[in-house]
Image (cartoon, helix red, strand yellow):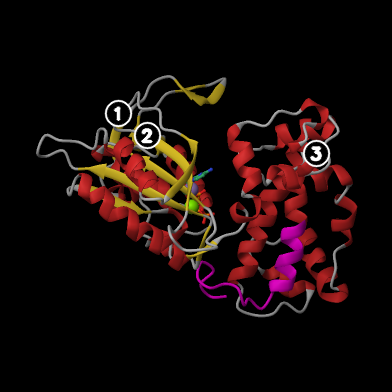
Amino acid sequence: CKQPNQNAKACLNEDIIRKLEELQELHKVKPTEDDHWRVYSYSKSIRALRAHPRRIKSLEDAQKIPGIGKKTAQKIMEIIETGDLQRIAYERTEDVKVISIFTKIYGVGIQTATMWYARGCRTIEDLCNGVGDVALNEGQKIGIKFYDDLNSRMPREEAKAIFELIKPIALRIDPKLFVEIMGSYRRGKADCGDIDILITRCPDDGRTHEGVLHELLQKLHIAGILTEDLALPDYSKPLEAVYHGLCHLPNVPGTRRRRIDFLTVPWSSKGGALLYYTGDDMFNRSMRLLANKMGYSLNQRGLYAGVVRDPRNRTVKLNTGNLIASETEVEIFKALGVPWREPHERVT
Ligand code: DCP
Ligand code: MG
Ligand code: MN
C-alpha cells in the first residue's frame, strides 16, 4: 500500500476500493455534471485509500484521510459493516449497465453508447446484428473482436518484451533516434493498459525523424508485431504525429492483443512531451493548473508564457505565447517551482 503505483494489489482496504470502483464505473456513463464530479471525487478517495497503510475500522479513521469526505466515509462504513453498498444496486439500472458495456468498446464514448441504447441495442450481439440500424466503424469492429483483450491490462514484463522487439527495429532505421516507453510503464507500474512510445531525434547533424514513423509502422506490420491499425498518423506536420493500433508478441500462441500508441515530437519539445506522456493524467492536470495559475500554459510541447486567453472561453488561446521551457523535464519543473519528482512519484 505504501507505493500506490507499485504492486498495489494486496491493499488492506481492497474490498472497500472494489465497491467504490464499482460505483464510480456506474457514474462514469451518466451525463450530469454531478456524475462527472462524483467520478473525480471517487478517484481521489480511491487513490487515498490505496496509499493508506492501515485497515480502516471507523468513520473517524476514514474521515481523517485527506481526500475523503463525510459522504464517502459513510459509504466506507457501510461496506465495512455490511460488505456491500446499496447505492450500487440503486445506480445500476439497465441503461447504465448496457451503456457501460458499450463504452468499454474501443472508440465508443458515452454519446455513441447512449444513442445505441436509445435505438434498442442491449447487447454487443445486437450491435453486430445491426439492431436499430446501427452501423459500426472499423475501429469499433476491432474493439468488439478483441473486447476482452482490450479490457485487460498487460503485465509490465509483456510491455517490456514487446518494446524490446520494437526499439531495435526503430534504431535500424536511424541509430540516432530517441525511442522510449512512456506512460504507466515509465512510472514503474506493475501492469500497463497499453504501450506508449515516444520518438524524437536531435537535429544537430541537420537530420530529423521525418518519415521514420511511417517506415517503422510498415516494418512492425511485416514483423508481425503490429496487427491492426486504429488511428493512422496525419503526416501534415512531419515531426509531430500520433498513431494508435494493436500489437502482440509475434509467434507466441494464445497471446493477447495489446493497445499501442506512438507519439513523435520535434526535439525542441522533448521535455514537454516526456512530461506529458509520462503522466499520470491527474498529475498532468495538476501541473497544467499550476502553470495556468502562474499565468503560463503547459502542454505536450512545453511551457509557454504570455498566452492570452479569450475571456469568454478560457480554453481558446488568442496567441501561442513564448516558449520558456521545453527541452528537458527538469527545466519545466524549475520554471514552475515544483521540486523534481521521479516518474514513479508522479501520481496525485
Ligand atoms: N494523458 C493525459 N490526459 C489524457 C490522456 C493521456 O495527460 N486524457 C497522458 C498522461 C498519461 C499518458 O498520456 O500517463 C499516456 O496515456 P495512457 O492513456 O496510455 O495512460 P497511462 O499509460 O498512464 O495508463 P495505462 O496503463 O492505463 O495506459
Ligand atoms: Mg499507457
Ligand atoms: Mn496510451
Which residue in the structure is indicated by mark 1? 238
Which residue in the structure is indicated by mark 3? 126
309 left or right, relative to 325: right
200 left or right, relative to 55: left
Mark 1 → mark 3, Cα distance in angstroms: 41 Å
Work out whether mark 2 precedes mark 3 in sequence or the reverse, and give the earlier one: 3
Disc 3, SS: helix
Disc 2, SS: strand
Mark 2 → mark 3, Cα distance in angstroms: 36 Å
Mark 1 → mark 2, Cα distance in angstroms: 7 Å
Q: Is mark 2 within 8 Å of ligand 3?
A: no
Please say whether residue 16 is one of the residues in the magenta stretch.
Answer: yes
Q: Is residue 138 above or below residue 278?
A: above
Picture coordinates of residue 217, whole percent (x, y):
36, 41
Between 36 and 263, the one lying in front of the other is 263
Work out whether mark 1 precedes mark 3 in sequence or the reverse, and give the earlier one: 3
Residue pictured at 86% horizontal, 50% vertical: 91
Residue pictured at 49% horizontal, 68% vertical: 190
- Residue 91: mark in rendering: none
Range of residues picked out in magenta = 1-22
- Give the class, few, some or many, for how many residues have Cα within 10 Å of label 3's Cα (few <14, many ≥20): some
- Give the class, few, some or many, for how many residues have Cα within 10 Å of label 2's Cα (few <14, many ≥20): many
160 left or right, relative to 259: left
- Residue 241: mark in rendering: 2
118 left or right, relative to 273: right
Between 109 and 78, the one lying in front of the other is 109
